[in-house]
Image (spheres, rainbow, N blue to C red):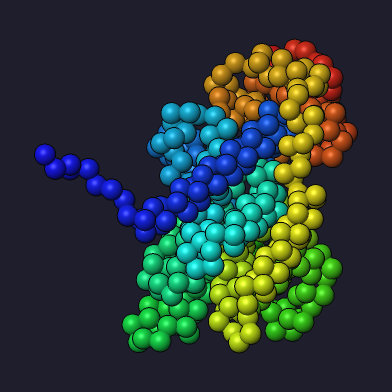
Amino acid sequence: MASTLSVASPVQRSLRAPVLLVWASAAVLAVLFSTLSLLRHARLRTSGYDLGIFEQGVRSYAEGRLPTSLLKGVDYSLLGDHFSPVLALLAPVYAVVPRSETLLVAQAVLLAVGVVPLALWTARTLGGPAAIVVSSSYGLAGGLWHAVAFDFHEIAFAVPLLAFAMAALGRRRWRTAMLWAAPLVLVKEDLGLTVAGIGVLIAVAGRAPRARRLGIGTALFGLASTALETLVVIPAMNPAGVNQYTRQVDLGTVFTQAGTLFSNHLKLTTVVLLLLPTAFVALRSPLVLIAVPTLAWRFLSDNPQYWGTAFHYDAVLVPVVTAAFVDGLLRLRRGAGWTAAHQRGVLSVSVVATAVLLTVSPLMQLTTRGLWQPNAHERAARALLARIPDDVTVAASNSLAPQLTGRADVSLLGVLPLDRSRPRFVVADTSIVRQYPVDAEGLVALIASAQAHGYRTVDAADGVVLLERQN
């Protein structure tokens, strides 16, 4: 009897091998990202701003409501802060596992998946060694690790979308690129500008009239989305009727001070650190221009936190510069006189640059003993947090808030006056000198005021104080 089993051909096996390896590398990245973020959360190194805020928003979706955050204010609509309805996708998972750790793991997986399209594209065009280098450049990028080390943010959804879109652009699959890019407008309001940039690139690079029409339509869609979300939706949903972030960007400087955008050393350093792992080959590709909208609004802002690399703002740029790296290598290879030795040289520079930058990456926190072992302060804090019942109102300091947002209604101590919010419990960690919105001295003053206005001290240990309302 003839066998009905099919046997994979050598070609099929050769194509399957990189797919399996790439997905395996994504799994490793997801584990590493999750490990760092979960350990930081366990060591009380996360915060109400922003992990607690996002958890309250996702919790709202899971309960069938529009997203609100008590940490931002009473009935504060998060759609009036940033337009990120994509967070609703986390609601089903959060309903099953209603913990802040759910958001951290989801972010880790989303960031890790971004390596897949970029590595597969590289493997099939430049070979396995190049794919390993590109995967390492992506997976070890400071932009991703700083995002992992700073709570959770909605831009985690943008990273894989951009990775798939950029890989499609590099392969000149315009419609596929558009389909991956379009949902970015549901991630955050400024990403419509990135969608517009992708549309312009399609319109310019596409030779067929259909491609040009697709590109123009995509660009108009992106611009219209950002305009609608920024100027209409967010002010309409904001309790104060304004978009607080547009006030931080001075559009007048676009033409009058364009030359100063990169004169600031912090801004210039950000650009250099983004391009260094690509051995600056990314500059050979027009794909790198997709980074311009994000860099523009950040550098035009009067908020210095947007200029540097310390937070999560570079994460959306990692798939862009990585794709530009791959495309730049392909363009160099098509040039006269380019040899395999040249490619090996560029890849070697990338490996060295990535390794050097790794020494200052948040990834190195995984090598510290303090991240893996609970200390006396953490044990004292957790003992007091355990004395707070579920489903009560709590005013918590920033570092303690995300430990409670999954099981209580948490406001941020120092934002709402206690005589107005009257939470049942107040818990504060006064051992952290600098914190938001008030420092340790301010927290001590708030605790003293609470004790003078109807709150008694339940217990205190190692700088952590728990109060309960008496009336």
* Image location of residue 203, percent across then percent down: 44, 82
Q: In which quarter of the image is the N terminus?
A: top left
For image coordinates 35% across by 87% down, the residue present is 209
Q: Nearer the viewer, residue 415 or 84?
A: 84
Q: Would residue 393 be visible to someone looking at this image?
A: yes
The quarter of the displayed image where residue 71 is located:
top right
Left/right placement of residue 452 relative to residue 13 reads right
Q: Position of residue 271 (x, y in %)?
A: 73, 68
Which residue corresponds to the image point at 83% horizontal and 70% vertical from the top-left? Answer: 264
Tell me where residue 55 sits by quadrant. Answer: top right
Residue 219 seen in the current view: no
Q: Which residue is at a point 46% across and 41% down the rendered structure image?
A: 90
Q: In which quarter of the image is the C terminus?
A: top right
Using the image as rendered, state which of residue 15 and residue 167 is in the foreground. Answer: 15
Q: Is residue 56 left or right of residue 349?
A: left
At a point 68% along the width and 31% down the height, the residue shown is 39
Left or right: 421, with 20 as reference point: right
Query: Who is closer to the viewer here, 436 or 231?
Result: 436
